[in-house]
Amino acid sequence: MLSVAARSAKALRVRPIVSASRTFTSTRCRREETSRPASLNVFTDEEQMLRDAVKRFASDVVAPKVRDMDENESMDPSVIQGLFEQGLMGIETSPDHGGSGSSFTSAIIAIEELAKVDPSVSVLCDVHNTLVNTVIRKYATAEQQEKWLPLLSESKLGSFCLSETSSGSDAFALKTRAKKDGNNWIINGSKMWITNSYEAEIFLIFANIDPSKGYKGITCFLATKEMGIKIAKKEQKLGIRASSTCTLDFDDLKIPEENIIGGEGKGYKIAIEILNEGRIGIAAQMLGLAQGAFDKSVPYTYQRQQFGQPIGTFQGMAFQIAQAAIEIETARLLTYNAARLKEEGHSFTKEAAMAKYWSSVVAQKVAGSAIEWAGGVGFTRETGIEKYWRDSKIGAIYEGTSNIQLQTIAKFIQKEYS
């Protein structure tokens, strides 16, 4: 029998989001149908259809579970199942491998829409799509893609295992080691702050096969849960509580040599390139979060009356709301611009850093203001407004801290002007 979320998800769809015979990008973008430049808010028909479908799924399936998942600090399995059934776990993956073959911007749209309702569900979808799936699509052999991408598109959650105790911002200082043993590699070490790791069944693990080569010894391995990955600790966090964040231990973890992704010593290159893309995903998450907080709090300001008028019509509050709307829009434009640059094959590292940094700043600011606009009601957990603020704090930390983003941007400016 289908789960409640699965039945709801099916009920949402007039036609399936994903099938082998059609994809989101089957129609040309309107920006390509005119010689004049189009705005960043111009989308293909398929991208707009995706946005509408994700919005319905988030509202009908995710929203009723948000508070319980947050309080219980766990992801409802039916939500994960619903994401797979809706075709949201293989957005860019080829239909030949069970995905929709859609655009990178489509993935960003899905992440944004999910974050408006629950940033925890959003980051689960984000890491799976923009990190795990992308690594397999870009760097795996044809045989590896044939084996793993259908699973990742249809049923198996993925996790990206890079960070360690001594390697956070300095990602390449990792201590996890891999040693060759016949046709296998034996991995020993641990990883920290690993998203999706509690529910995941497929893991991309970065380990050094030759420390004498420094970061050039780092290699990407694909492992499955049943190979013996141990969850040492599940973190209790301020925000995004339903999203699992765990410490993983590898004790003589045996991985077949055919599970090396991208070749020996190529892990550093994979990590650098993928994290640049992943930062656009986090920007989308923070953008959606800011919009979600705004959407929940602002209507209350026009319902709540003091001194004979809605509090949102007082100039002081009206100006705050207007400023927040402007800042959300700037974050949206930065995020969409970085996404389009990436999918068009242009350089986007600086733009991704800008989008990630600014969206994180805006998310914290707007989510904090949203609590104040709603007053005492906003401070209670019942409304869900305060959750957006708690969830927003992680934006300045993961997939590159805000200082790392500023450093990246500054290097580009220095290169341009010096």
Image (cartoon, grey):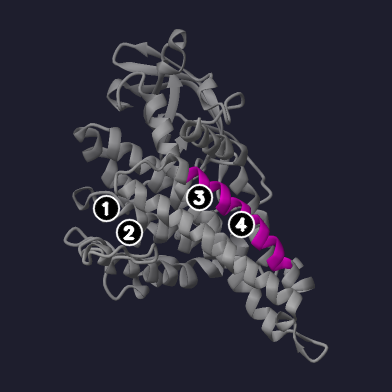
The label nearer to you, 4 versus 2, is 4
The residue at 56%/47% (across/down) is: 357
Q: Amino acid at mark 1?
A: Gly
Q: CA distance from mark 4 to mark 3?
A: 10 Å
Can the viewer see residue 16 in this picture? no
Q: Amino acid at mark 2?
A: Gly
Of callouts 2 and 3, which one flags the residue occurring earlier in the amino acid sequence?
A: 2
Q: Secondary structure at mark 1?
A: loop
The label nearer to you, 2 versus 3, is 3
Of callouts 2 and 1, which one flags the residue occurring earlier in the amino acid sequence?
A: 2
CB atoms of marks 2 and 1 within 8 Å:
yes
Magenta segment: 352-371
Of callouts 1 and 4, which one flags the residue occurring earlier in the amino acid sequence?
A: 1
The label nearer to you, 1 versus 4, is 4
Q: Secondary structure at mark 3?
A: helix
Q: Secondary structure at mark 4?
A: helix
Q: Which residue is mark 1?
A: 99
Of callouts 4 and 2, which one flags the residue occurring earlier in the amino acid sequence?
A: 2
> Going by the image, does 231 lie left or right of 142?
right
Q: Classify 10 Å Cα crowding around label 1: few (below 14), some (14-19), many (20 and above).
A: many
The quadrant where residue 81 appears: bottom left
The quadrant where residue 380 appears: bottom right
Task: From the viewer's side, name the closer residue of 308 and 140.
Answer: 308
Q: Which circle marks residue 180 in the picture?
A: none
Q: Which circle marks residue 355 in the picture?
A: 3
User: Does the segment drawn in magenta span residue 140?
Assistant: no
The quadrant where residue 396 appears: top right
**Picture coordinates of residue 102, whole percent (x, y):** 28, 56
Of callouts 3 and 1, which one flags the residue occurring earlier in the amino acid sequence?
A: 1
CB atoms of marks 4 and 3 within 8 Å:
no
Task: From the viewer's side, name the closer residue of 270 and 320.
Answer: 320
Q: CA distance from mark 1 to mark 4?
A: 33 Å
